[in-house]
Image: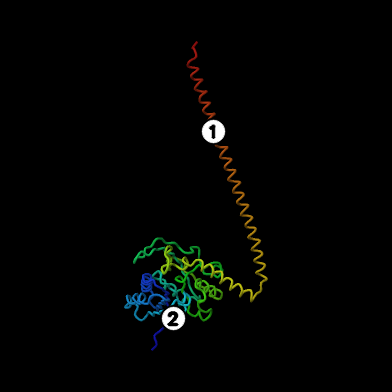
Amino acid sequence: MNKAQPAVAIVMRTTDRGLLLERAVSDVLGQSLQDWTLVIVNDGGSVAEVDDVVEQHSSALGDRVQVIHHDESVGMEAAANHGIRSSESEFIVVHDDDDTWHPDFLTRTVDRLRGSNDAGVAVRTEMVFERVLGTRIVEVAREIFEPDVTSVTLFDILRVNRFVPISVLYRRTLHDDVGYFDEDLSAVGDWEFLLRVLSAHTMSFIGEEPLAFWHHRREATGALGNSVIAKSDEHQRLDLLVRERHLKEHVKDNGLGALLYLTKHESQLADHLHQRKNYAEDLLLQSLEQNRQLSERLGRLEEAVSDASLVSLLRRRYRRLKDRLAPRA
């Protein structure tokens, strides 16, 4: 009898971050839903470091773990694709080695998708700022990521990526429909994948308490750094590349007409807003100058009132003194 496929395939990308990897594996083992398979993709990092972590948790992991070692790095998106293609499951989630979950992340996301026709589900996410001090990970602060998010829409994703891999679980069948992660992208691949997904499908959102935790080490460099921080220039370059590519596909199918109109209108709107901004700044400066002049007048008035009060006081005292000194009849 064939063993039933697990509910979730967890793809964990890692490179030379044994301390973080150990925390991530412990995080998976702490999930309330245990119907998963874990695929660790070591993308060109130390083999011994990864194998040591897996060995530490071998009794708890059992036969639910698969380790893939790349002799040389193939990049984040190719590593994710390798892990996905090497597994079987109903759902997929990418859990990078430096991020963590609420213990009920898998339970609540799987329940949500099994109770709907949505292609995937995203959750409220919290950024955790931390430092690595030797063999210790020290938390510095926390902040909700994109606190205004209440749903997952293509409109929002077109402007900026509001979700990260640790916060999204989706159906494996999506890859048959929209393809895999773009291996030509060394960054922003998760955003580009969501663009394709949301162009044809819907995703739901669990927005109560944070269920995913996106960890940041702002001062870290090298292997311990975050790609979104350490490679910010690359993110900006590839963001523009993805937009340019999709824009050209749109033009190929629809022509330039509407875009020419919109860009002209946008330019005029930008000029109008710039003029209004300058006008508002002028009004503000005029108001500040008027306030300054008013303050000066009030100051002079206060001085005059003060002087007048002093003169009046002296006059009253002079009269009283004069009355006392005047000879009595």
Image height check: is 208 above or below 327?
A: below
Q: What amino acid is labelled 1 in the image?
A: Glu
* Residue at 49%, 22% in the rendered image: 317
**Residue at image mark 1:** 303
> Tags 2 and 1 in contact by the CB under 8 Å rule?
no
Badge 2: residue crowd in 10 Å (few <14, some 14–19, many ≥20): some
The residue that appears at 39% across and 72% down in the rendered structure is: 16
Place of residue 128 in the rendered image (x, y in percent of width and height, measured from the top left): 42, 64
User: Can you tell which quarter of the image residue 300 is in?
Assistant: top right
Q: Earlier in the sequence, mark 2 or mark 1?
A: 2
Q: Viewer-proximal residue, 265 or 47?
A: 47
- Return the residue nearer the eye: 185 or 151: 185
Task: Say above or below: 285 vs 238.
Answer: above
Number of labelled discs?
2
CA gap, disc 2 and disc 1:
83 Å
Q: Residue at x 54, y 75 (%)?
A: 196
Q: How was this image coloured?
A: rainbow
Q: Nearer the viewer, mark 2 or mark 1?
A: 1
The residue carrying mark 2 is 89
- Residue type at mark 2 is Ser
Give the class, few, some or many, for how many residues have Cα within 10 Å of label 1's Cα (few <14, many ≥20): few
